[in-house]
Amino acid sequence: MIKVVKFGGSSLASATQFAKVKEIISADPERRYVVPSAPGKRNAKDTKVTDMLYACYELAEAEESFDKELKKIEERYNSIIHGLNLKLSLKEEFETIHKKFENKDGVEYAASRGEYLNGIIMAEYLGYEFIDAAEVIFFNKNGSFDAEKTDRVLSRRLAKTDRAVIPGFYGMGEDGTVRTFSRGGSDITGSIVAKAVRATAYENWTDVSGCLVADPRVIDHPQTIKVITYRELRELAYMGASVLHEDAIFPVRKAGIPINIRNTNAPEDEGTWIVQTTCHQSEFTITGIAGKKDFVAVNIDKDMMNAEVGFGRKVLTAFEENDINFEHMPSGIDTMTIIVHQPEFEGKEQPVISAIQRLAKPDSVEIESNIALIAVVGRGMKATRGTSGRIFSALAHANVNVKMIDQGSSELNIIIGVSNADFEKAIRAIYDIFVTTQL
Ligand code: ASP
C-alpha cells in the first residue's frame, strides 16, 4: 500500500513545523512519496516564500538590486536548516538562483525555487531521495499540463525508488524552461504523483481538519465534513468553499484514488475523505453549504414567450456577444431570468440590454442587483423527502425573502437566491435547521 503525502506551506513554515511533518511521515511506513510546498506564513503578518520570490524577481526584471531580498529568503531557509540541526548548505543553490535572476530566467523559474529548495531540505531531513520536479512533470507548449508524458516518465521514475520527495508546483515546459501551475498548485502535483504510483490514498496535509460544512467566517466553529464526493466538492468549491486547488481532483479522480484532507497541527483528527462515490451517509442530510454575493438577475418578460421557438437562444446570444458567462436561468411561461456575476456584468450592462432588445424583442427587461446565491449541497437529498421544505421554512422563520430557486435534476444541490443583505442570516438559518438541531 502506498500513500502520497502533500504538505502545504503552513505545515512547512518553520523547523517546528518540519518536525511535526517528520513525525507524521514516520508514523506510517506507507507514506512513501512526499510533495512539499514552499514555506508559508509563520504567523498572520508573515510573508510566504513564494510571494517573496515573486517580489524579488520583479526587482531583477526591473534591473534593480535584489540582493537584500534574496538574502532574506536564504535566511528563512537557513533558519529551518539550523533549527533541524542539518548539515546542509544551500549556498551554491542561492548563487545559481542569483545568476538566473540576473539572466532573467523567468518568473515561473523564480517562483518554483520555493518548492525546489524546501524539497531539498525535506529529502535531507527524512533521508529520502530528492527528485527535481523539472525532470518528471511536463507542460505543453501552451503552458497546459502534459498528463500523458508526465504519467509515463513519472511512474517509471518512481518505480525505481521506494521513498522520495518531489517538490510541488512546477515542472518543465516544452522549451526546457521551468513552468508552474497556478497558485496553490502543489495540490495538483500531489495528485499527479498519487496517480503515477497508483496510491491507495492521497493525503493532503494542511492547517485545518478538513472541509467544513459551512464557511467559518459565517458560522462559528462549523462541523467538519467526514466524507464528500468529488462532485459535491466541485459544487461547493464553485460557490467559494476552498480547501484544495480546483484542478487537483482530476488526476486522482480518474484513477479512483481518494483524497484525505488532514491537519498537520492535529494529526489525530481524521479529516475529510474526498471520494468518487460512497454509501456513507452524511449525518446531517446535507453535506455542505456555500455561497457567494454579488450577482445580478436580468428578468425578461414577453407575452407568449412559451410559444416562441428560439427565444431562449436569442436572449443567450445577447450575453454571448458580450462575452458574459451566465450562472443560472430559471424561467416561467412568459418570463425568463438570467443570473450573471455583477462585477462582470456591470461594465457591459447597456450593450447586453440593447442586444436583448434587438435580438429577442421582449416586452420588458428589468435588472435586479446585489443578489447572493447559496448552494445547499448533498448527495443525501435525493433519498430524503422534505429537504427543500425544511430549507424554505427555516428561511421564512428567519425572515429571509427567497428571490430564486434552482434545483438540478441530479438533486445534488439546491441553489437559492437571496439579497446580499440576507446572505449571512440565510446561511445561519439553513445551518441551524440541518446541523445545530441534530447535534
Ligand atoms: N507555493 C505556491 C503558492 O504559494 C504553490 C503552493 O503552495 O501550492 O501558490
Image (cartoon, rainbow, N blue to C red):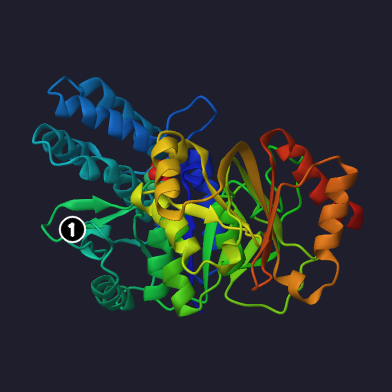
Residue 237 percent across, percent down from the top left:
56, 54
**Coordinates of residue 299 in the picture (x, y in percent):** 59, 47
Image-quadrant location for residue 366: top right
Q: Which residue does the image show at 16% across and 60% down from the upper left? A: 141
Q: Amino acid at mark 1?
A: Gly
Note whether residue 129 is visible: yes
For image coordinates 42% across by 62% down, the residue present is: 190
Q: Report whether 122 appears left or right of 147.
A: right
Whether residue 159 is situated above or below residue 36 in the rendered picture? below
Q: Secondary structure at mark 1?
A: loop
Spot occupied by residue 182 in the image (x, y as percentages of width and height): 35, 49
Q: Indicate the quadrant of ligand 1 in the picture.
A: top left
- Residue depicted at x 58% and y 54%: 302
Q: Nearer the viewer, residue 319 or 388?
A: 319
Q: Is residue 25 left or right of residue 278?
A: left
The residue at which mark 1 appears reads as 173
